[in-house]
Image (spheres, coloured by chain):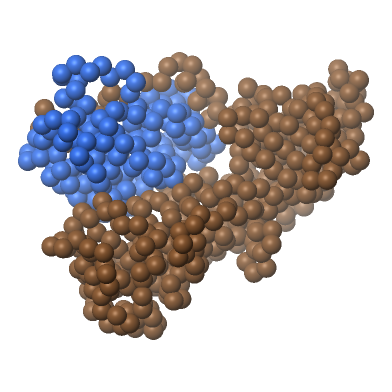
Chain colours: A blue, B brown
Amino acid sequence: MGRSFDETFASELEPLHAYLARRLGRSAADDLAAETFAVAYRRWDDVDPERPVRPWLYGIASNLVRHHWRKERRMLRAYARTGVDPVLTDDAVSPARLEARLERAALAEALAELRDEEREVLLLHAWAELSDAEIAESLSLPLGTVKSRLSRAREHMRNRLGFNGQVEVDSPKTVEEQP
Amino acid sequence: MTNDDLQLLREFRAVVAAPDEATRRRIYARATRETRARRRRLPAVGLAGAAAAATVAVLLVSPWSGNGGLVQRALAAVGTGEVLHVVFTEQPGPPGWYDAVSLPSGTPLPDPTFREEVWYDQSRSLEKTVTSLPDGVDDAVFGQSVLSPQGDHNAAGRMTNAITMDGNKATPSAGPQASLEPALTDFVDEYQSALASGKASRTGAGQVDGHEVIWLHIAADPSQHYPAMDVAIDSSTYAPVQVRTDDADPVQLDVSEIDTQAYDASLFAPPTVTSPVSSTTGATAPIDATQAPGVLGGQAVWLGQSWNGYQLVGVAQEQFTDSYAPDSGKHPVQSVGVVFTYAPPGGSADSPDVLRIEEAAQCEFALGMWCNGPYEPQAGVLFLHQPASSSTTVVDGIDVAISQQGGDADPVAVANALQPVGSSSSSS
């Protein structure tokens, strides 16, 4: 007997909402999480109880998110330019926090530079914590395509963020000068 | 300072707070609303003349008998058949990521008006929508969907909202999809029951498009997430002529027809599959620029060897494959195209700042084109759409998709600079 919709909602809403909020902001996350679960609820009888539900759920979400790629790119770019995280409202400016903010701003810029399809795969891997096979199932892509997109995306991130992943952020000016 | 890109990404996500309990409850209610509403209605299935009988019953016992004359006439104007039939026009705006501008000026073009025709059988949970251009002649119908308890279908086959389901696998539907604005669905779903349940109240009179109208206000139903609506009903016929939602994202629709019909199963048959369920770009083979016209059947366009600081760094033939829903019986269709890749001086086709001009002899879903209806690429119009900053148009009979990463080339300037291959070797 598979999990019920309510059990799945209880366990999956929070990570899904965080995933969507990080990508598109909290307001959009509310809408998209509701739409994702609406589709899931309506199609619950189609779910194969022998298979994990998470790839299916994130596949639904990904198809909704793709309509908002432009907004996502704008948000990331705005974050990179200003250092102000659009998702956060209470990020106090202590030296440690400032460094973290600059680090995340550089990360946002690097994410914005990715091809949308590569960013999709990377974020499903890093944030939704899906395996390569699960991402392939979610997006209906060949496994090899997922692996190559993920490889390219991570290579871009590592190159962009600095040698061995060291984020090269010296001053706020460095961030502000990024396009 | 972190030393791992994935760790940094996860820290980036971790700063997001979890939804509070009120948000959780709200999301749950929204997610289950539509289906709960359908299930709530299902016990009525099988009762002969359910809709009409229920309406009459409610009319007899409802507490708003003082207002009953008006409401009764409004209900009577719609009729008592099992299938509610509504025709309305709306200007929904582009589907989220399309903006149209005129070429060569770059002047924004107005959004097209759509004609939506809906047949809705509440007792059987069936809904058919046909979307067309009100003034169209050829291919005026560009979207159809049929929603039923057995599955939702559109021109790409079985679908659920923006995806096609295959077991637990979600596949994006590449083709155009007919979908009502939620507020319009709410109207189709709610109008009769709102009248019958007494949620409608008269708020005044006025004129709409030359019609003397009476305005009804239908209160919001938070439990079902129906927004509040103001409905103008013709003061002579009592049929609704305009609906305006009263919420954060207001929608107006102009109703040109509304009536009820007898149930006819053939009306809700799934539409014929005409759109692919997925489109892919296959392996590319390098070619010389002079071969491009031959690949496309005689014509190709490019920016020359260089343009505005970009240099041509590659030309390749592409292969597109359109795949159709498995149960459609349609085989995959393959076609070819050409991609011209430009990069800043010293760059290559793999540079982060590249400009791609992808071309085909006909509209290609694989190039992000909407190959049906008002957003199909056309000469003199540039559709600026996302993702990946891509734009589509038609130049010299060739369907063109312009995309770039990392750069800031103006797509209007790019489109205006396209010229037939062979007419000039370089520009600017």
Indicate the quadrant containing the N terminus of chain B: top left, top right, bottom left or bottom right: top left
Q: Quadrant of residue B288?
A: bottom left
Residue sitting at x 69%, y 36%: B244
Looking at the image, residue A20 sits to the left or right of residue B340; the answer is right
Q: Quadrant of residue B320?
A: bottom left
Residue B236 lies, in percent from the top left, at 91, 40
Residue sitting at x 69%, y 58%: B134
Residue B46 lies, in percent from the top left, at 77, 37
Looking at the image, residue A36 sits to the left or right of residue A23; the answer is right
Count of labels shown?
0
Looking at the image, the residue that sits furthest to the left is A163
Query: Considering only vertical position in the picture, is B332 above or below A45?
Result: below
Query: Considering only vertical position in the picture, is A68 above or below A3?
Result: below
Indicate the quadrant containing the C terminus of chain B: top left, top right, bottom left or bottom right: bottom left
Query: Considering only vertical position in the picture, is B398 above or below B373?
Result: below
Residue sitting at x 67%, y 40%: B252
Question: As rendered, which of B379 and B35 lies closer to the eye?
Answer: B379
Looking at the image, residue A149 sits to the left or right of residue B210; the answer is left
Q: Is residue B59 visible?
A: yes
Q: Is residue B144 visible?
A: no
Residue B183 lies, in percent from the top left, at 64, 37
Residue sitting at x 28%, y 50%: A115
Q: Quadrant of residue B220?
A: top right
Residue B181 lies, in percent from the top left, at 61, 42
Query: Considering only vertical position in the picture, is B363 above or below A81?
Result: below
